[in-house]
Image (tube, coloured by chain):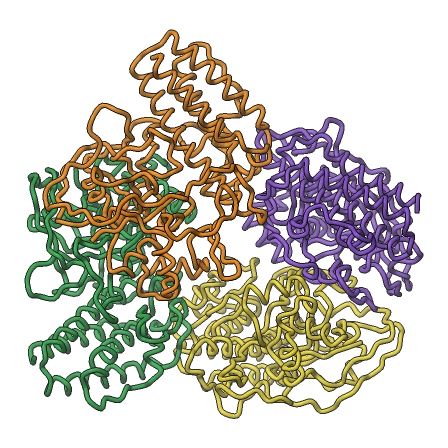
Chain colours: A purple, B yellow, C green, D orange
């Protein structure tokens, strides 16, 4: 267990490290209901260890503060009442300082627990908690970028911290032959319930691009009137761009004819050869249609994955987020993890520059509503 | 072509026949944006023949009224401006009488055209128009039921006209073995673009029910607190029932402890052995979860179809409405037909009691948003 | 009572006469919640006589149809359930024919009742019912105009029927000296509870215009950028024009640089010397501010009334609709008539071209929310 | 000027003093669009002095930060762009520390300016700025209470700080005779444009209560079904309580049958003899109707004011917020101060426990939309 405790500590330290450049003020706001404040991420991940591990395995454990369960639960209906999701930005107390004390308290007790208990059930939950915290590390940083983007002074999170300034390493197409492919997680390592259920899928021959779509290519689409021509758009996407007056990727701003983008290093000019990001599924799909190409399915992606350089962008697929054959919702709170979101969302595959190192997995199924853009999303084309 | 003209005339007459029990007043209202008034269905199907056939193939054709293109276009952005979808219920002129004259005028000109032209392109468009009109026959009757349901006096459309009073003919399970199955339309007959692209799908072994879920079974779910327990529901479904205070299938009303349902024959008691209908995907999915079972995928359904007694309900599948491999949007107005709806909707397979005879097809892919209930939907379980 | 019965019959006939140019279809739609369909006006006014008079005074009276109370009640909470206000446009049954039979049935029974009963209580309620019906005549025609205005074919209600083609008969200013003025209804004639309570108001000296604002003057405001400059607008008005993209009076359309207006005679060019109409309080107030003038209060209007040529437009005043001193809500259903609307509305004084002859009264207090424009409103300035 | 500078300094210190119990986190949230975060109040009042005084009168003045004009302007359209009102809670930078530096910087420059300039124009603007800051002191504390109230842990702002624990000093009725009364500001002291224009109003005889309505009286109304009976309510108020599920004054919570209220000292039991507060105009009016009494007009209040013990609650009047005779909007930014809100709001008279000492004025016209409850409002009845 000592290796696992080391990983636990590293993960916990990494979350704190991400907050190092923050002012106290930055921990608070929640401008939109799909994102959460840093303070909430810090607390919620801690509460997860307290609720699912310490309360269960550590005899005589006293919770740090009985209110915290209520405040920092997310969507786990099973585990009692919880504060309303859209009001996280109103909760100023406990203070940030108290939240850090909460983290230390829970970390210490986990350490204490691991000295005496090494059951495989505990180990599994600890690994789940670590992976859960890593997921929140990614959200913490993308939510923060979103909040900062409202500020007309374009706050700098950190110099030399750029999620979006990557280029392609290769171009051209990979051809994948027709056949039956095995899909889903295989092995003994950690994985989520939604990727379980290794199963066979028949794929027809297809080709998939080695490169991501770049800013230059997307600017071409924009300049060709891509956002003004309904032909390229799904009906729902066409409504979405018109109702929200979407005319460019998220965070882009045109100043005196030139395109800039808000980044965590501040406002920066758009670099043509950088890989495009912060686009919705609707935009990804419209772009593909305009090109006369298409998005891959998640099965195609997984079949081709070992020949791709992935990990820079979450890649929108043209697969809806649905259960694999044999998927079954687990009992208890863990059962609320993924299965209940399996409608109206699209799968993204790969990983992004915001994904914690080591948290990538070729069978990982990320998912968002097709309109969402605040993650580090991108486009890889197929045909 | 004379056989085809006969089918054309029968289809056109069938639409008029469906309206025979209506008063003029009934042709007008549009209480919700997803349904349309009878007058609009009568006009729009006619406009389809005028716009896509007569204007193109009949030399010297003069449109019946130049305003009608504007008024009765639906969502075809390609073909000029159109009245706003949500305002169809405000359009009192042209009158119903004029709309019937419009139908006769167009029918006569189609007849005239077919005397001299028998190109395969014309034939294909005519068949498309006939199928399009049959789709609208089903919508006309389900939309009408929806409008009537708002009226506290429970209007009777027609005695002995009951879309929902059917029973199962068989029970038990069919086992389908693992293997590769061919999916999609095969043959030379009419079919829509979304079912084209015959392709291979690998299916693991599964079982599918011979019977539909009945009212009695669903009442059991309701009495077991099915609508009050979040565990059975997709997160989006749980929000939907709570925001809309859904506590029973659509059109159900509890009067002094007893359940009734609005039907086109007026208010009727719920019969336990009748097949359940007017439920959303969310409700279908929650019911299946409560039963410890699941909904079939559209591929499983198609693989099992020849052993099923289908055609009484549109059966919700746990498949999102997505393109088949090789799907490509057609050029021109026909290209707007189906492809642009391929996001955020679920597939329904089979057909319903409202489906015009002869319009069923084993590869037909119907689709609606998961919340919609006004079609004659039902549940067939799998495991 | 025979004179009163004559008035009753004339009023009832006048409502029917207003509907003479209608097609059955026109009786149905309700595109917005603040307006009602003609069928509803016809039924509701009839229900008023049945509910408040026949059921109370005519021994053995049998209601025409027990559902109608539910369907055609308006906002009288006291009198049982009622259909939802925003769903009036969905009620196709009873048919228009049945509604006319309902009118005849109630009229006949009122005649019968008056042969034997001539109490003053009955007389008062009958006069209330007549005035109530006259109010609905005005709404019927303005609601109809509103519904027709949605139709891109600009339906003609009737040739030579123009609510808006009036000119001023005089110009200049009237000076009213400082002093105490008596405000409110005086006499024995019919009046509503909101104008009761004759009371004294002190007015400082002011001047009021003999003329209404014309289209030419308002076009000047528009051309001077009136709709684009926040300085002229109340904060709430500025939000309203921006959220609703208001750039001209209601029903105005600019076609190739020229202004037209939808009228009950169809689309007509704007005549500069016609009196402006279909403007909100916000627009009236912004225009007055732009002119360096102001709107009169309702007390100033009433003090000056005998020197004004009024009756062509409902004149927005800068008075909120509030109770007169001593106002007390009556017992029973009549008590719901006016008092409960006394917040967030502005008073309009005078009468309009849509007001039935004989229904004008110098103490009449009309009232609408400041955003409403579908009545025949206008502007008279003060200083 | 040295006295004035002393007042300036005291006022500025008082604002800072109100924030003394706050944690940095508390300065940030804006849960509703009608309230603002403490940081914004601190900055906006400072910006007011910088923008209207220092930039104009102090030669060579360099603004502290050119972004601040944009960030901390409120609704002054005249003075350039401004951040969106509903997004104040997203602005984490500048930090609270920087905002306090901004305050010191501006204070120092005001001091410097006053050493050399003593024009009456400057003096007037300085007094306006001081009064403006005092208004924001009241909003700061009521907005803060509102934000804290979202937190399920009921944060304590400060022990022994209770805005709402007051009792009546007297009971009974005062009779005011019929006559002409002078209304509006008289004298040379500071006052707002909306109270200017001393004018005559004729009042009929009336009586006004010496006491405010207490919690006990309001509980009686609640227990008598006051919130369930439409008869007591304005139509708009009835909709408001039903749509928002209002069943008690703001901040009240029923726990095991007993009523509590969130206060700035934490959750406290409702004391029957305390003066009621945090009610909307709708609730005030419904309560008065239930009692068979009414609310006074603002003119009645002003005529009776010298016989009343006022200053504990903002008293809802049944007067709409409208211009006094002769009201004229001032030129420039000051002209945007009050006049543009003169529609759809009701006047409140008196002052509250949150009003800074010395900021009360018998002619002061406070105003809010009838639904608002977060100010320290109360009810005084008339008849």
Q: Nearer the viewer, residue D260 or C27?
A: D260
Q: Residue at the top extreme?
A: D116
Residue D4 location (% of width, % of height): 35, 17
Quarter of the image for residue B300 reads bottom right
- Out of C303 and D290, give the one closest to the viewer: D290
Q: Residue sitting at 20 percent across and 29 percent down?
A: D186
User: Left of D176 or right of it: where is B312?
Assistant: right
Q: Is A298 situated above or below C87?
A: above
Q: Position of residue D144 (x, y in %)?
A: 49, 39
Q: Position of residue D242 (x, y in %)?
A: 42, 62
Q: Tell me if D89 is positioned left or right of C197 in this view.
A: right
Taking the spot 39% from the left edge, 21% from the top edge, the residue there is D52
**Which residue lies at the image location 37% right of the left edge and 75% below the top edge?**
C81
User: From the viewer's perspective, is residue D335 above or below residue C243?
Assistant: above
On the image, the x and y values in percent for residue B13 come to: 52, 84
Q: Which image quadrant: the N terminus of chain D?
A: top left
Residue at point 9%, 47% (across, down): C304
- Of B299 and C179, the residue lying toward us: C179
């Amino acid at each position: 267990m000592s290796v696992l405790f080391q990983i636990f500590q590293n993960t916990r330290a990494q979350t704190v490290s991400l907050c190092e450049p923050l002012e106290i003020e930055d921990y608070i706001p929640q401008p939109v209901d799909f994102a959460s404040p840093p303070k909430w991420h810090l607390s919620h991940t801690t509460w997860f260890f307290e609720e699912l591990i310490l309360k269960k395995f550590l005899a005589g454990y006293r919770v740090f503060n009985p209110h915290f369960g209520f405040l920092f639960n997310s969507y786990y209906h099973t585990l009692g009442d919880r504060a309303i999701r859209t009001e996280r930005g109103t909760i100023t107390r406990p203070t940030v300082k108290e939240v850090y004390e909460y983290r230390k308290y829970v970390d210490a007790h986990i350490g204490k627990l691991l000295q005496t208990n090494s059951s495989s059930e505990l180990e599994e939950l600890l690994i789940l908690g670590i992976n859960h915290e890593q997921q929140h590390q990614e959200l913490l940083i993308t939510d923060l970028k979103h909040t900062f983007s409202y500020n007309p002074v374009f706050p700098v999170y950190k110099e030399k911290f750029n999620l979006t300034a990557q280029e392609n390493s290769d171009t051209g197409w990979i051809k994948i032959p027709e056949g039956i492919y095995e899909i889903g997680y295989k092995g003994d390592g950690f994985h989520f319930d939604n990727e379980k259920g290794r199963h066979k899928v028949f794929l027809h021959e297809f080709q998939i691009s080695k490169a991501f779509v770049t800013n230059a290519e997307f600017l071409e689409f924009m300049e060709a009137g891509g956002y003004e021509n309904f032909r390229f758009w799904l009906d729902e996407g066409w409504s979405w761009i018109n109702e929200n007056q979407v005319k460019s990727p998220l965070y882009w701003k045109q100043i005196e004819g030139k395109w800039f983008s808000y980044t965590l290093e501040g406002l920066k000019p758009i670099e043509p050869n950088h890989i495009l990001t912060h686009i919705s599924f609707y935009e990804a799909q419209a772009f593909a249609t305009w090109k006369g190409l298409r998005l891959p399915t998640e099965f195609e992606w997984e079949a081709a994955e070992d020949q791709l350089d992935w990990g820079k962008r979450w890649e929108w697929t043209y697969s809806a987020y649905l259960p694999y054959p044999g998927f079954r919702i687990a009992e208890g709170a863990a059962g609320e993890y993924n299965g209940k979101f399996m409608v109206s969302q699209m799968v993204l595959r790969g990983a992004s520059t915001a994904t914690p190192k080591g948290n990538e997995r070729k069978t990982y199924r990320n998912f968002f509503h097709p309109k969402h853009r605040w993650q580090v999303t991108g486009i890889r084309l197929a045909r």
